[in-house]
Amino acid sequence: MMQNYDVHAFIRQALLEDVGDGDHTTLSTIPADARGSAHLLVKDQGVLSGLAIAREVFLQVDPHLQFEQLMKDGGAIGYGDIAFRLHGSSRSITIGERLALNIMQRMSGIATKTAAIQNMIAHTNCKLLDTRKTTPGFRYFEKLAVTHGGGVNHRFGLYDMILVKDNHVDYCGGVRPALDNVKKYLATTGRSLQVEVEARNIQEIQEILSVDIAFRILLDNFAPTDLVEAVKLIDGRVLTEASGGINASNIVAYAETGVDFISMGALTHQIASLDMSLKAIK
């Protein structure tokens, strides 16, 4: 998970974007002293995510609001469930409504998709990884949602792991020169970073193994039959990850090859938000 991510700063900026100099509809219709209650009504089936973030939204709008949590992030939800209740200023509840819903609906959609795909491969030892194919500025929340759905976070950004991919290799003139440069960089900078290396074929796998620096090899665009051969060659010396062209229709075949991880960008960039509403309690 992202180091030192400032959730409060994100919420402040998001509220500024939405509220600006005031929610003039709320200010003009609801008396300043009005008190009320509301609840989050689930209108879909899936996995809940974003509850803790929604709480922070409402408390940043008004620290005097009472947030009554009724469910947990990562839990199964169905139509008609009530995730939380709010009590306090009617104006404050209305002002925070849309931001909280936007976050929870998207996060719950990601958690739901992750859980569905992970369940498809639950009979294997393979785990789902997310990627950096995320919404700019919203990555922390999307990756958090993946974990709520039972997936595993890959690197958060460019700073927390070295991942040598095809372009790095091609620009550098080959796998061996690229990995020699990585060794020099780590020694010179004194950094301790895990190193993963992408392989496009058996020859590149052999080169990567000969350097003895990678903790995981990314097997990109391998067909399942070729992946079996690759996993056998690696023989547990390092972890293995498959990616490229993998989706719900073929993931079982990939997971059954014995690969340790499968990474899917679709977990965060091809999802449908879950339907939820914040309803006033009369």
Image (spheres, rainbow, N blue to C red):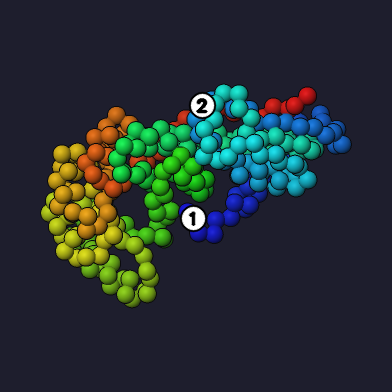
Q: Residue furthest left?
A: 203
For disc 1, the neighbor class at 10 Å (few under 14, some 14 to 19, many from 20) is some
Residue situated in front as seen by the camera: 215 or 100: 215
Q: Position of residue 7 (x, y in %)?
A: 59, 51
Residue sitting at x 83%, y 34%: 35
Quadrant (top left, top right, bottom left, bottom right) of the C terminus: top right
Residue sitting at x 37%, y 74%: 189
Q: How many marks?
A: 2
> What residue is disc 1 on?
2
Q: Position of residue 192 (x, y in %)?
A: 37, 69
> What residue is disc 2 on?
45
Where 256 falls versus 43 (above or below)? below
Q: Position of residue 8 (x, y in %)?
A: 63, 52
| Residue 128 can be seen in this image | yes
Where 165 falls versus 183 (above or below)? above
Where 55 falls versus 161 (above or below)? above
Amino acid at pointer 2: Gln
From the viewer's perspective, tell me whether residue 130 is left or right of residue 16.
left
Residue situated in front as seen by the camera: 36 or 96: 36
Q: Disc 1 on helix, strand or loop?
A: loop
Marker disc for residue 240: none
| Residue 164 can be seen in this image | no
For disc 2, the neighbor class at 10 Å (few under 14, some 14 to 19, many from 20) is some
Residue situated in front as seen by the camera: 65 or 221: 65
Task: Indicate which disc, 2 or 1, sits on the residue closer to the N terminus.
Answer: 1
Amino acid at pointer 1: Met
From the viewer's perspective, tell me whether residue 262 is left or right of residue 133.
left
From the viewer's perspective, tell me whether residue 168 is left or right of residue 203.
right
Residue sitting at x 50%, y 59%: 3
Residue sitting at x 32%, y 75%: 187
